[in-house]
Image (cartoon, rainbow, N blue to C red):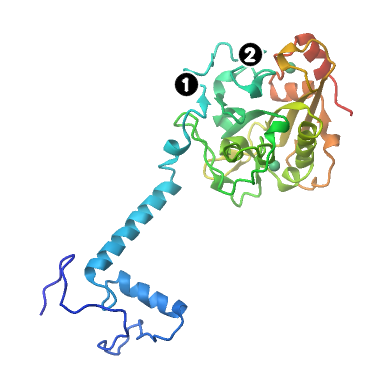
Amino acid sequence: KRRPLWIGERSSKKRYTAGPITTQKPGPSTVSVQDKDAPLSGRLPVYLWRHFTFGRPYMSRKKSWILLLIAIVIAVLWFGYRSGWFDSARTQGPATTSASNPAAPQNPELAGQAGLTHESPHLALGTPADATPEDEHLLLKPQYALSYKSAIVSPAWVAWKIDAGSYGTVPRYEGKFFPETGLPAGLPIATHDDYSKSGFDRGHLCRSLDRTDTVENNRATFSMANIIPQTHDLNGGPWLKFEDYCANLARESGKTVWVVAGGSYSTEPARIGKNRVAVPTASWKVVAVLDQGIKPDLITSTSGIRLIAVEMPNTRGIIRHDWKQYRRSVDEIESRTGYDFFGRLPSRIQKDLEARTDSL
Ligand code: MN
Ligand code: MN
């Protein structure tokens, strides 16, 4: 008759070793006496079972308790990490300028005004503006600028600039896509898992391949606020080919390319995932290509500047399609989306260029 042992108390002076058990009675126990020569893979489950059922003679009670506590602490930390407890501390910082931050030059009364620009190189040709700016939230990052729309749990648009300096040798970020932490608390935001098994790709707007100069810049493209649902046939088909075409202009031809992209949505869009991310019926993109030496704020003629606009259906069966068949005029995308693009260009030049459909 022995009283129970307290944590840390030794049951006897005998030292416990991981030898074969000789004192155990044969019985219906599922844990059998182990064979020292059995392969580790066979012995390991028994070993672990003994530890976590406080079994002797493998380990003293004290050691078992400590191991169990360490396991619990690791489990809690891991759970916390996966739940994003540490996210804001890790990724929120001076790198992101939120529109609700007084430092950002956001003025709700001016947001609808054509031509308004913000302190972002990605918005040098203007901030896309529609008649209802109050249902969106502007977010400026070093890598791109975006307008987040809670109603679709997605960006309404993402704008970014590419030139030869955007490209380097950094490999594609390998982690999971992460929920955006730069938005005000309380907005519904998408997570990596919302897209899992949905049948849709996590379609980058500012793509990973256009931010390969630094690890940090590449990682930033994996924010879920830069992602919309795209079919694989769109994402890996004409959309990709047009991305490659634009990248080539920046990389090989010395152009500076300003891009704005987003989705077109029906009034009652299909939804995916726990956070009910809206699925667009199409993806659109408007692009301004400026010749070398043309400065965005000194444009007085239509020479040296080319606009390209596309709208591609978010459907299957288009993977082999050429991107060129989806060209539209910027005016068509403006009337479809309600945004005015390139509002900082003189209106006479907008009027001329935006009415054309690129045919190069
Ligand atoms: Mn893509
Ligand atoms: Mn315009």
Q: In this rendering, does residue 128 appear at all?
A: no
Residue underneath mark 1: 101
Q: Position of residue 139 (x, y in %)?
A: 55, 26
- Tell me the quadrant of ligand 1: top right
Please tell me whether mark 1 sits on a helix, a strand or a loop.
Answer: loop
- Count residues near mark 1 (Cα–Cα under 10 Å), then give few for <14, some for 14-19, many for 20+: few
**Of 245 and 279, which appears nearest the observer?**
245
Q: Which mark, by number, is residue 298?
A: none
Point out the tag, 2 or 1, that comes first from the N-terminus: 1
Q: Is residue 8 left or right of residue 252?
A: left
Q: Residue at x 61, y 52 (%)?
A: 197
Q: Are marks 2 and 1 in contact (CB under 8 Å)?
A: no
Is disc 2's CB within 8 Å of ligand 2? Answer: no
Q: Position of residue 252 (x, y in %)?
A: 80, 34
Q: Residue at x 54, y 13 (%)?
A: 107
Residue underneath mark 2: 116
**Of 349 and 15, which appears nearest the observer?**
15
Q: Quadrant of residue 22?
A: bottom left
Q: Residue at x 40, y 42 (%)?
A: 85
Is disc 1's CB within 8 Å of ligand 2? Answer: no
Q: Residue at x 65, y 24 (%)?
A: 122
Q: Quadrant of residue 226?
A: top right
Task: Determine whether 200 is above or below 333 in the image.
Answer: below
Q: What amino acid is at disc 1? A: Asn
Task: Determine whether 294 is above or below 159 in the image.
Answer: above
Q: Quadrant of residue 130?
A: top right
Q: What's the CA distance linking mark 2 and mark 1? A: 18 Å
Q: In this rendering, does residue 152 appear at all?
A: yes
Q: What amino acid is at disc 2? A: Leu
Of the 4 image quadrants, the one containing the N terminus is bottom left
Please tell me whether mark 2 sits on a helix, a strand or a loop.
Answer: loop
